Image (cartoon, rainbow, N blue to C red):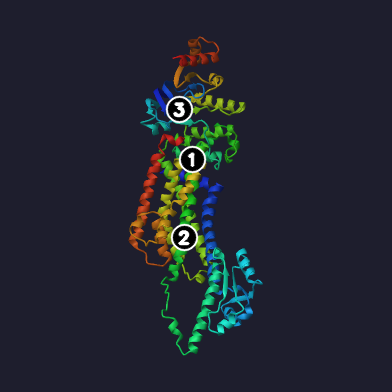
Amino acid sequence: MRTFLTVFCKEILDNLRDRRTLASALIMGPIFGPVLFAVVINMSIDRALDNAESTMTLPVIGQEYAPNLMRFLESRNIEVVAGPDDIDGAANAVKAGAHDVVLVVPEGFAEQLSAAEPAKVELYSDEANSQGEKETRRARNALYAYNQQLAAMRLSARGVNPLILQPILIDAVDVSTPSGRSAILLGMMSYFFIFALLMGGMYLAIDTTAGERERGSLEPLLTLPVTRAQLILGKIMAACVFMAASLLLSLMSFYVVLRFMPLEQLGMTPNFDLGVVAAAFFLLLPFILLGAALMTLVASFTKSYKEAQTWLSAVLIAPTLPILIVSILTLRPQLEFMFVPSLSQHLILVDMIKNEPLNGLHVAISVCSTLAIGALLTWVCARLYRREGLLG
Amino acid sequence: MIKVDGIHKSFGKVRAVRGVSFEAPDGKITGLLGPNGAGKSTTLRVLYTVLKPDQGTANIDGADVVTDSLAARKNIGALPHGAGLYPHLSARENIVYYANLCGIDKSEVDDRVAAIIQLLEIEEFADRRTKGFSQGQRTKVSLARALVHDPRNVILDEPTNGLDVMATRSLRRLILKLKDDGRCILFSSHVMQEVAALCDDICIIANGQVAINDSIKGIRERTGQENLEEAFVSAIQMVAEE
């Protein structure tokens, strides 16, 4: 026990003095996630607001031939501006990307309209230009709406109920709750937590084998009258402490960031109060042991510090794979998934954010299976620490 | 007292050690002398229990290095070749870490560490972080932490490598002091003059085998060479011709 504590305390002290470890544990992991998250959320808020409320400008050639249409467009928050001089100019401007979309009203528009013939307008757009897609769609929708309005007026003038033009009424009902909508975007938070906690222990895990070896401090350490299992347990536990600190910081910084994000504007009200922060911390605790043991295990096979860093970057990505697969296939949480570390934590976390009742059995299986795999990996680490090949 | 009896060790196809036997008694300095790659380090690594011999046995004060390695380690202070320190810890903290790992009584740790710091004359830089220490300072601190639990047997693998004249001299003085305490000192070197200046017994190793194992006087007599360097060369040739 004393050996374990001695190693544990020394590793904590040693790493607290190591800027690189501190940076990755206490800054990199916890800051990276929330910052990236804030950027993504802000971008989607901008886009959501763009669609409905912002004013769009639409260059029009031949405004004077259709004053009513222009007024209609203005009423839909589309600002009509003077377009290029002629049709060729319009095509070139769209092709060159100077305008996303240009509306051309030909000279005969008014006559065709009053003669009740289909009155032609031309809408120039570049289908290959995905940025202009939104503007084009909005212009086209406005023209459809004007079309419908005129048709309805004509029918009423002839004593026909305009509703016959609408044999089907589509009413799209979105059953997602505000918390539920949050889950899609906020689901990626669980990965940031896992990333942060792994980053927190990465350098300690490397140091246990590759780092000590490279520094030449491993061999003298192994000549001491202690068992190697005690050494490695002390080191893994020290890594766990750094990982837990990193996780806690990451949870707290998300908590703070979410306070300041205008998520209601996106129709989201994530359930991420301090209670959920605490629950998420305890839910992810078993994953810390697993992560520490896994990283130590991977690092023990490497020949140098650099090589260990390379391989551990792969370990940082590994926990995303099950999350990614399930997200792509949009699978609902099932009992079997709870045996898979990282995936089980992700699914339970998403449920918590959605404010759905927790399934106690799911939580129990997640905690137990993750702990069991973590303990198994720790045991394998201790076995491998006894190899002669450890000295390189 | 270190006893080595017919140990063999191979790494893949390379037969690093092929039946080395010798004894290093208490109160004497035994030198393991041999050219680079002769198997000196491998032999010492078996003795301080980080390698297991393929064949043969070795024991430290009667404790077998394989079957009773924990007890064997209790009685060894080892300075492996190129031993490194923890750069973020001070010299004293490095030594205290080893003292605690060796299970020295908590109330005695500070006194013991202070005493070893004094013995090795490292007070001047004891409380500085070891990052940036010179090779001489590093060797002294490594030796201090290896000796902090007062081991009866001291194993030093090329301790004077990379040391300047002054540092080498102070290390020699220290080794002699350890000998006068009645400890068993086993140290390896490829520098013959150094072994000659310090050792009571010399075990010349070449090609993974013991070429000759005797006192300096005995080696001179057996090789028929008055000059020790010639004796060394002819002993190595004796093995090579076999």
Disc 2 to disc 1: CB gap under 8 Å: no
Q: Which mark is residue A188?
A: 2
Q: Secondary structure under badge 1?
A: helix
Residue position for label 1? A210
Residue B3: where, in percent of width, then height?
41, 23
Residue name at image x 58 percent, y 26 percent: B168
Residue position for label 3? B42
Q: Quadrant of residue B55?
A: top left
Q: Amino acid at mark 2?
A: Met
Say yes or no: labels 2 and 1 on the same chain.
yes
Separation of marks 1 and 3 at Cα, in angstroms: 21 Å
Disc 1 to disc 3: CB gap under 8 Å: no
Relative side of A210 to B56, left or right: right
Chain ID at mark 3:
B
Separation of marks 2 and 3 at Cα, in angstroms: 52 Å
Separation of marks 2 and 1 at Cα, in angstroms: 32 Å
